[in-house]
Amino acid sequence: MDLQFQKRKILWGGATAASQYEGGWQEGGKGIDTQDVRPYIPRTSNATTATRLLTQAMIEKGERDTKGRYPFRDGSKGYYHLAEDIQLLKELGMDIYRLSISWARLFPNGDELEPNPAGIAYYDRVFDEIRKAGFKVFLTMNHYAIPLNLVKKYGGWTNRKLIDFYLRFAKVVFEHWGDCIDYYLPFNEINAGYFSPFNGVALLKPEDGGYDQSLVFQSLHHQFVASAKTIELGHSMVQGKFGAMVACFCYYPYSCKPEDNLKQTLDENTNTWFCMDVLSRGYYPSYMQSFFDANGIEFEITDEDRELLKHNTCDFVSFSYYQSSVASCEEKEKTAGNLVVSTKNPYLQANEWGWQIDPVGLRVTLNRIYDRYQKPVIISENGFGYADVMEEDHQVHDQYRIDYLNRHFQEILNAQNDGVDVVAYMMWGIVDIVSAGSCEMGKRYGVIYVDADNYGNGSYDRYKKDSFYWYQQFMKEYREE
Ligand code: BG6
């Protein structure tokens, strides 16, 4: 029997994000953005939370402080290493590059009517280099950072006005670089708004307590509308495909106890699928009503919004995957992960940051997402964060990363055999970049080492790790198959 499922050649690539990579925070009139005010706090039990959930006082301090360590202001100094980095990525042999554009470089305050010419000139250079290298392009239009002014003056994404500001930014992107972009992602990990509201929806944490969940969901709703409007506009202006992306946590029930299974379903629905359901199906899923009722969450959705969402769904679905998670109805030992804390899985090992390594979970996730949406799938982030050490001879022997990648790649190929339509794979932080969660430079994902430490000391020179040669060889052999 031949079911004739589609099996295409996967595009292999790598990814960076403007705020974590570029640096040059004051070059060419760039405005200060929400990542530029996140301080480095040396690792302790709550450092990540403290530098991720910013308050009004923290952004004011960050804006005034010119001496403290704010790692995103330097990133990996990609702004100054642009041509060299693209050349290295070309030598690596990637098919596709995922990058993002700094909103504050194009619109320093976010609410200007016209873009900043120096910002346009910078991205002209970026896309020229990319064109020369011949990569396909996956553009994240907004990867967390937004102009700080939009938070101070408008309250971030709580304010509907941000939709129009964002659309103005999107239009400039389409007009200037639309001819060389293949895949667009209006928002990185849109469900981050729920777990990491400062990064996700630029919402400040009240000084004396938790977030107002109605504001979180109102902000997310505004991003849904901005995403749909971007797709509507983009489809009329450019050729590329438009996607939606969530961070996937791949929940397993702790046991076969019915209550653990129910918890797995509910956690996965709200934490992972909710945002994708809205953006891919075009309407709010029914299960969210009981969640909103139970948590007293109220926000505005207009009839016009509903129509817009219905008619402007995404062309492809995409996700980040670093680790799997466990849902248990009883209190069990916990471990950290990307954005969420999870119950510890006794069958898995974790990295130094507690993220549980699970290649099979990637195959499970690919199957779940494809079956749920029946749209082409892009793995927009995956990789292994490790405190790599560079030897005196500038070698970095990252066999652990090679093992991680090898096992994950095998599961991607297995998922393809399961019938999943996998379009592309993007290795996260292909050049070492600043960690979005903990602001560390020392949590590295790249196959290219950047000589800098958590305090910004170092030459910022680039060196190829062992994984560089491994990934290069993998892609070469894959193409020859
Ligand atoms: C994803 C983000 O959540 O995870 C990236 O989209 C981030 O920006 C990546 O860098 C890895 O997380 P971290 O905290 O290790 O940088």
Image (spheres, grey):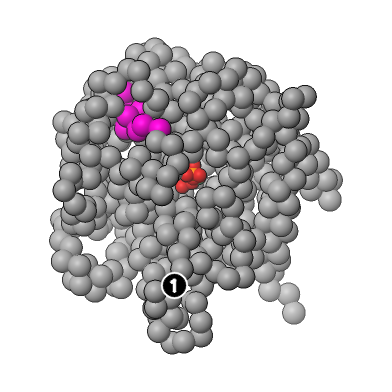
Whether residue 436 sits left or right of residue 147 in the image: it is right
Q: Give the vertical position of 28 relative to 55 (above or below).
A: above
Magenta segment range? 32-40
* Residue type beneath disc 1: Lys
x 16%, y 48%: residue? 208
**72 left or right of 95?**
left
User: Relative to residue 203, is residue 93 depicted above or below?
Assistant: above
Q: Using the image as rendered, state which of residue 314 and residue 328 is in the foreground.
A: 328
Instruction: Give the residue pinned by disc 1.
Output: 332
Question: In the figure, residue 296 lies in which quadrant?
Answer: bottom left
Q: How many numbered tags mark residues here?
A: 1
Q: Is residue 270 above or below residue 94?
A: below
**Residue in the picture at 59% in, 52% down:** 351
| Quadrant assignment, res 19 | top left
Q: Main secondary structure of the magenta part?
A: loop
| Relative vertical location of residue 27 with respect to residue 372 in this rendering, above or below | above
Q: In this image, 98 relative to 466: left or right?
A: left
The x and y percentages for residue 88 are 69, 26
Quarter of the picture containing the N terminus is: bottom right
**Does residue 36 appear left or right of residue 203 in this picture?**
right
Give the residue at x 65% y 38%: 388
- Secondary-structure class at tag 1: loop
Horizontal and vertical percent position of residue 32: 31, 23
Q: Looking at the image, which residue is at 62% across and 61% down?
A: 349
Q: Magenta includes 35? A: yes
Quick check: can you spot residue 449?
A: yes
188 vs 66, nearest the viewer: 66
Query: Residue 108: x, y in percent?
Result: 30, 21
- For the residue pair 447 and 364, the one nearer the viewer reads as 447
**Residue 186 on the magenta segment:** no
- Residue 73 drawn at (x, y percent): 41, 23
**Other residues around mark 1 within 10 Å, as few (<14) / some (14–19) / many (≥20):** some
